[in-house]
């Protein structure tokens, strides 16, 4: 199976743990080299985050388990990059 190198997920999480601690714990997964976390929306009880995760071979199941252990849920997988390297999006005339 080819390695997943980038994963962009939409996560709904409670206010606790704070975004910093939440992101740090996701980054501690063995298969994760780095995580960017962006706050998309917040409500009275929950926060919606976009997590951009990179690594040599990301273990989706491990990431999902950490998110769920922290009280969050993955709403969607918005981007996946697989293979020997990450292909960056190139602008097209339709853009």
Image (cartoon, rainbow, N blue to C red):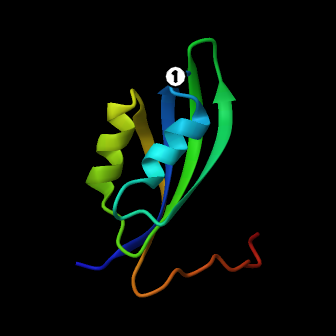
Residue 42: image x %, image y %? Answer: 66, 24
Is the N terminus in the top left, top right, bottom left or bottom right quadrant?
bottom left
Tell how many labels: 1
For the residue pair 85 and 78, the one nearer the viewer reads as 85
Position above or below: 13 against 29: above
Query: Badge 1 local density, few (<14 within 10 Å), some, or many (20+)?
Result: some
Residue sitting at x 53%, y 44%: 23
The residue under label 1 is 16
Residue 46, quarter of picture: top right
Q: Residue at x 59, y 27 (%)?
A: 47
- Residue at the farthest bottom position: 84
Outermost left residue: 1
Which residue is at 39% across, 31% downward?
70
**The C terminus - image quarter:** bottom right
Is 80 placed above or below 22 here?
below
Q: Position of residue 12 (x, y in %)?
A: 49, 31
In the rendered image, residue 76, in percent from the top left (x then y), is placed at 44, 44
- Badge 1 marks a residue whose secondary structure is loop
Where's residue 25, x and y in %?
45, 44
Please state which of residues 54 and 21 is positioned toward the viewer in this rendering.
21
**Left or right of 93 in this view: 66:** left
At a point 59% along the width and 35% down the height, the residue shown is: 19
Q: Quadrant of residue 83?
A: bottom left
């Amino acid at each position: 199976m080819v390695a997943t190198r980038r994963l962009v997920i939409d996560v709904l999480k409670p206010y606790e743990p704070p975004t910093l601690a939440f992101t740090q714990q996701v980054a501690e997964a063995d298969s994760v080299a780095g995580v960017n976390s962006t706050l998309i929306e917040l409500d009275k009880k929950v926060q919606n985050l976009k997590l951009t995760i990179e690594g040599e071979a990301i273990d989706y199941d491990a990431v999902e388990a950490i998110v769920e252990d922290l009280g969050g849920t993955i709403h969607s997988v918005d981007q996946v990059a697989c293979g020997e390297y990450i292909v960056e999006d190139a602008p097209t005339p339709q853009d």
